[in-house]
Amino acid sequence: MNALKRNGLGLVAWLAGIVFFLPIAWMALTSFHSESDAATNPPSFAASLTLDGYREFFGSGGGASPWPALANSAVASVASTLLVLVLSLPAAYALSIRPVRKWTDVLFFFLSTKMLPAVAGLLPIYLFAKNTGMLDNIWLLVVLYTSMNLPIAVWMMQSFLAEVPVAVIEAARVDGARLPTILARVVAPIAVPGIAATALICFIFSWNELLFARVLTGVVAETAPVFLTGFITSQGLFLAKVCAASLVISLPVLAAGFAAQDKLVQGLSLGAVK
């Protein structure tokens, strides 16, 4: 009976994986088609393959180069993720290992800030950026992404740090270690899987963010998602070019996910098991 249950769950997992993989496979195949073949309905899988979509994306066809936008996305995503980890680790420590009074209320307050629609804060943030000269500045996005990802990071890290043995921390205190040393040399190494899972999720959220980047940036601080919208013109949607651009822009996220998949599974398991 257990074997049948395991086989059934395995089959469901494979089917779910295929369902999630099909859009990526279709996007990859379409990116190698010409615009006329990509627009056919139903799609033709026997159409001739071409690299025209990728040439257009990388600027060989006379368009803008994507490298500045990709670099801006990398800076905003990596910098904001590092800031989130630095800020969320001590906050989660205070809410789990050394809980403050009414720590559950504090935790739910952090999470409730994620329920506020991002568009509700768009106008005041735009006016602030305009009056302070921060429009089209990549560091404004770093600050915004940090504030946007910090609540969910604290929530996740709290569940991970709750699994850290208190005896290990007390032993470090007896040896004279201060709080920064305990966090860096005791808590962080034990919670590496949880930190990796949190970092990956924050990186993905920052890399994919479009609303604030579209409104608050221009030519200088344009990010990859904003660059992608340039392929949607008044002449219509160039499907092959959009698929090629989407695939290239998705590669850093996919690569980070594959590289951290073991730590991600361990981290999610660490936070789920009590």
Image (cartoon, rainbow, N blue to C red):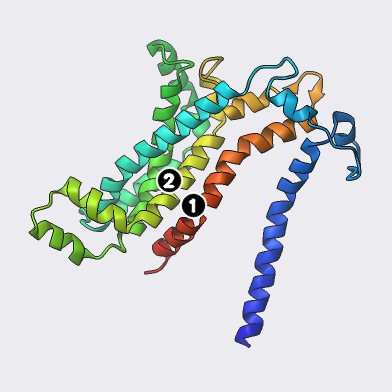
Alpha carbon separation for disc pair 2 and 1? 10 Å
Label 1: which secondary element: loop
Q: Position of residue 74 (x, y in %)?
A: 49, 31
Residue 9 against residue 199 in the figure, above or below: below
The reply to whether residue 7 is visible in this rendering is: yes
Q: Residues within 10 Å of mark 1 (few under 14, many from 20)?
A: some
Mark whose residue sits in front, 2 or 1: 1
Q: Is residue 59 left or right of residue 115?
A: right
Residue under label 1, please give it: 260
Residue at image coords 52%, 19%: 217
**Residue 199, disc:** 2
Residue 257 against residue 15 in the figure, above or below: above
Q: Looking at the picture, which amino acid does disc 2 mark?
A: Ala
Q: How many marks?
A: 2
Residue 40 against residue 8 in the figure, above or below: above
Q: Residues within 10 Å of mark 2 (few under 14, many from 20)?
A: many
Q: Is residue 151 left or right of residue 15?
A: left
User: In terms of image quadrants, where is residue 53?
Assistant: top right
Q: Earlier in the sequence, mark 2 or mark 1?
A: 2
Q: Position of residue 265 (x, y in %)?
A: 48, 60
Q: Looking at the picture, which amino acid does disc 1 mark?
A: Ala
Q: Position of residue 249 (x, y in %)?
A: 62, 34
Residue at image coords 49%, 25%: 122
Label 2: which secondary element: helix
Residue at image coords 8%, 54%: 176
49 or 123, which is in the foreground? Answer: 49
135 or 107, which is in the foreground? Answer: 135
Quadrant (top left/top right/bottom left/bottom right) for the N terminus: bottom right
**Pointer 2 with pointer 1, Cβ within 8 A:** yes
